[in-house]
Image (cartoon, rainbow, N blue to C red):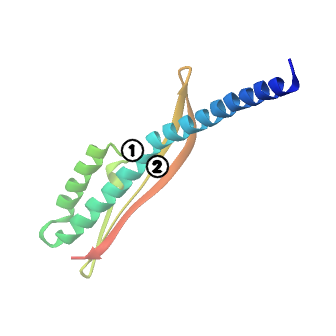
Amino acid sequence: MNTQTKFVQRQSGLGRLTLLVFGTIIAVVVYCGYCILPFYYCYFEITNQMEQVIKVASTYTDKEIREKLLYHIKKLELPVEPDDLRIERDAGTMRISLPYREIFYVTWKGKDYDIHTFEFHAYAEGHY
């Protein structure tokens, strides 16, 4: 075998290794995106619901607003307790806040490993 043939074989091997490494990296990124993007969707959805409720707050009591928001929280399956939802009215202004955490984890061989904890604080404020 001459040196040019060995060089071509070596280059071919490096190409396969590079393809394997970058293919694995892309697969991990796609999987993480698939798991993490719903967290942000739920955050923006509940924030939007809070803003919509504030627009019609003059026609509803705090209890009715809490029930409406808890319905959406339950629908989105957010990991919160009803007491975490705070509603405040002050001189024509309403503030609604909801702090919560989402945990990104991976299950491996029947055991869950926490990768990252996302701290969210949904907040809306406006005049009604």
Going 60% across and 33% down the picture, which residue do you hit?
Answer: 24
Pick out the residue farthest to the top. Answer: 1
Going 20% across and 55% down the picture, which residue do you hit?
Answer: 68
Q: Looking at the picture, how far across and down is residue 46, in whole percent?
A: 31, 56
Quarter holding the N terminus is: top right
Quarter holding the C terminus is: bottom left
Chain-order first, disc 1 or disc 2: 1
Tag 1–tag 2 contact (CB < 8 Å):
yes
Instruction: Work out whether residue 63 or residue 102 is closer to the camera in this orientation and state it.
Output: 102
Q: Residue 110 carries which label?
A: none
Label 2 neighbour load within 10 Å: few <14, some 14-19, many 20+:
some
Going 73% across and 26% down the picture, which residue do you hit?
Answer: 13
Marks 1/2: CA–CA distance? 7 Å
Q: Looking at the picture, how far across and down is residue 31, in whole percent?
A: 49, 37
Q: Which mark is residue 79?
A: 1
Kindly indicate the quadrant of the structure image that contains residue 123.
bottom left
Going 87% across and 21% down the picture, which residue do you hit?
Answer: 2
Kindly indicate the quadrant of the structure image that contains residue 95.
bottom left
Label 1 neighbour load within 10 Å: few <14, some 14-19, many 20+:
few
Tally the numbered discs. Answer: 2
Q: Looking at the picture, how far across and down is residue 103, in whole percent?
A: 49, 42
Q: Is mark 2 on a helix, strand or loop?
A: strand
Q: Which amino acid does label 1 sit on?
A: Pro
Q: What residue type is labelled 2?
A: Arg
Q: What element carries label 1?
A: loop
Taking 79 as reference, is 21 left or right?
A: right
Pick out the residue farthest to the left. Answer: 59
Q: Looking at the picture, how far across and down is residue 110, in whole percent?
A: 53, 21
Residue that mark 2 sits on? 101
